[in-house]
Image (tube, rainbow, N blue to C red):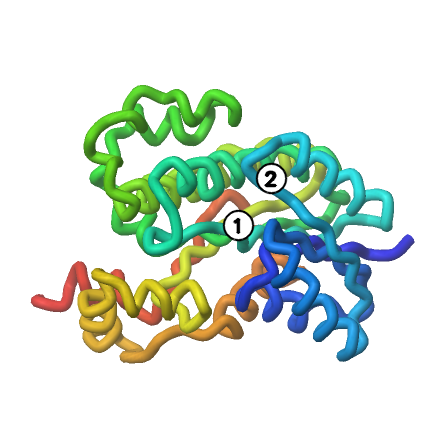
Amino acid sequence: MSEVLVVIGAGGMGEAIVRRLGAGRQVVLADFDERILDRVTAALDGDGYRVHPWKVDVSQRDSVAALAGQASELGSVTAVAHTAGLSPVQASTAAILAVDMVGVAFVLDEFAKVVAPGGAGVVIASMAGTFATGHVPAEVEAALATTAAEELIDLPFLAGPGLADPGAAYSIAKRANQVRVQAASLAWGRRGARVNSISPGVISTVMGRRELAGESGAGMRAMVEASGTGRLGTAGDIAAAAAFLLGPDASFITGTDLLVDGGVVAATRHGGS
């Protein structure tokens, strides 16, 4: 039976993960934007990858379930990488919560049903979620981790004035990704599979460059300059982390978050010491 790699999100990180891990596998590449999906599929096909494009709306469970079903029909789903998301300069609070938070919950739920024993998944969270650690009350984190996916958007604290700003919504959604993966690792484990999250820093993708050009860009550049590496990350940096977590060398790692930020969080917390 063929091995299947599922990559949700055809942007820079998604394409880099396909190029890193897709050789010799059936690749299901999913995205909401059909123009991007067609362009990236054509480029990958031309380079010899076996790509099956699929339009998905991760904010809708039925759409995610159909994607999971399609992937399992192609073979053994051994690797799942969820990279799709919206950033604060791209979308409203409501859209960010629907896609970045609820969408991840749907993906974790539906692919827990089809991932092969010995398989693994990764969810792209963000260092924004790591910065939120300690600022989100324990009871809120518990609700974000375990509330049924369809009920997440109705949690009372998500309707508060503090989340009117898309940047704040993005941070809480990405913290939700991190804790949701922790909780989901139990269901994935019952399938004999693993799941982890990756929290990138400032990455030079189309989305990342749009953020750098926005209102928060100057602050982001200052954090990068103060970091231990002093550079922007690349899609390849994230693909390398995904390859590790999805591969056999990480067979004892599940339910955790890997911070891949070039040292930005460390510099922000300890730069003055």
Q: Position of residue 244 (x, y in %)?
A: 58, 64
Q: Which residue appears at 72% of the width and 42% of the height?
A: 67
**Residue 251 can be seen in this image:** no
Residue bearing mark 1: 123
| Classed neighbour count for the residue bearing mark 1: other residues with Cα under 10 Å, few (<14), some (14–19), many (≥20) | many
- Residue at x 60%, y 50% (from the top left corner): 32
Name the residue located 80 percent from the left edge and 43 percent from the top edge. 70
Q: Earlier in the sequence, mark 1 or mark 2?
A: 2
Residue 139 quadrant = top left
The residue at which mark 2 appears reads as: 107
State the image coordinates of residue 108 (x, y, percent, origin top left).
59, 38
Task: In this rendered view, identify the residue nearer to me: 207 or 69.
Answer: 207
Q: Is residue 219 visible?
A: yes
> Residue lying furthest front in this view?
35
Identify the secondary structure beneath mark 2: helix
Mark 1 residue element: strand
Position of residue 94 relative to residue 265, above or below, is above
Q: Residues within 10 Å of mark 2 (few under 14, many from 20)?
A: many
Give me the C-alpha separation between circle 1 and circle 2: 9 Å
Amino acid at dot 2:
Val
Q: Amino acid at mark 1?
A: Val
> Is 253 placed left or right of 115 in the picture?
left
Are the residues tagged 1 and 2 within 8 Å (C-beta)? yes
